[in-house]
Image (cartoon, helix red, strand yellow):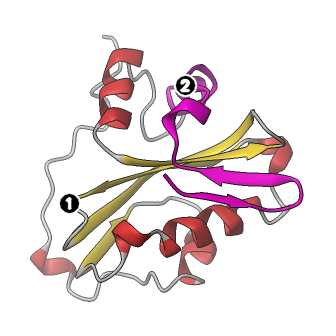
Amino acid sequence: MVEINEPDYRVSTDLNDFDLETIHQFISNSYWAKGIPLSTFKKAVDNSLCFSILEGESTQVGFARMVTDKATFAYLADVFILPEHRRRGVSQLLMESIMAHPDLQGLRRMLLATKDAHGLYQKFGFTQLASPEILMELWKPNIYQKN
């Protein structure tokens, strides 16, 4: 478990600190996982290295999830800060905590997908793909949508 404290916010990897209802509500309404069932999201959380950002002791204000083998590769997913806490340096604190986590050191590759936060991730060394031609995907963007 890792915990980093700032005057108003703290980052924790302790699942006991997570407000899964708040996190799921945000994620299930996001552009990247709209409609994700709680059971599916809970399984993703249980099988990932997750980061919770809290205001004070227990108010959930943000979240991020690393899908990783903790040796060679990690994929950053489900990152968010609640709108009322944006533009306060909270995303910076969250990313600093993620990048400093002991289980994420020495990895050969980290990936992420973002529609609108390139500037944030560039501050932490993320760039456009150097060789996009070597990557492939099986993409099902509407998998959680009910027909």
**Quick check: marks 1 and 2 in contact, CB under 8 Å?**
no
Q: Position of residue 26 (x, y in %)?
A: 60, 30
Quadrant of residue 88 in the image? bottom right
Q: Position of residue 28 (x, y in %)?
A: 50, 26
The image's mark for residue 20 is 2
Q: Is residue 21 above or below residue 27?
A: above
Crowding near the residue tagged with mark 1, few <14, some 14–19, many ≥20 C-alpha atoms within 10 Å: some
Q: Is residue 88 above or below residue 64?
A: below
The residue shown at (54%, 74%) is: 121
Q: Is residue 30 above or below residue 94?
A: above
The residue shown at (73%, 53%) is: 10
Q: Nearer the viewer, residue 20 or 36?
A: 20
Crowding near the residue tagged with mark 2, few <14, some 14–19, many ≥20 C-alpha atoms within 10 Å: some
Q: Nearer the viewer, residue 70 or 119?
A: 70
The residue shown at (38%, 25%) is: 42
Of helix, strand and loop, which one carries label 1?
A: loop
Please name the amino acid that badge 2 sits on: Leu
Pointer 1 residue: 69
The image's mark for residue 18 is none
Residue range in magenta is: 1-29
How many marks are shown on the rendered structure?
2
Q: Nearer the viewer, residue 1 or 34?
A: 1
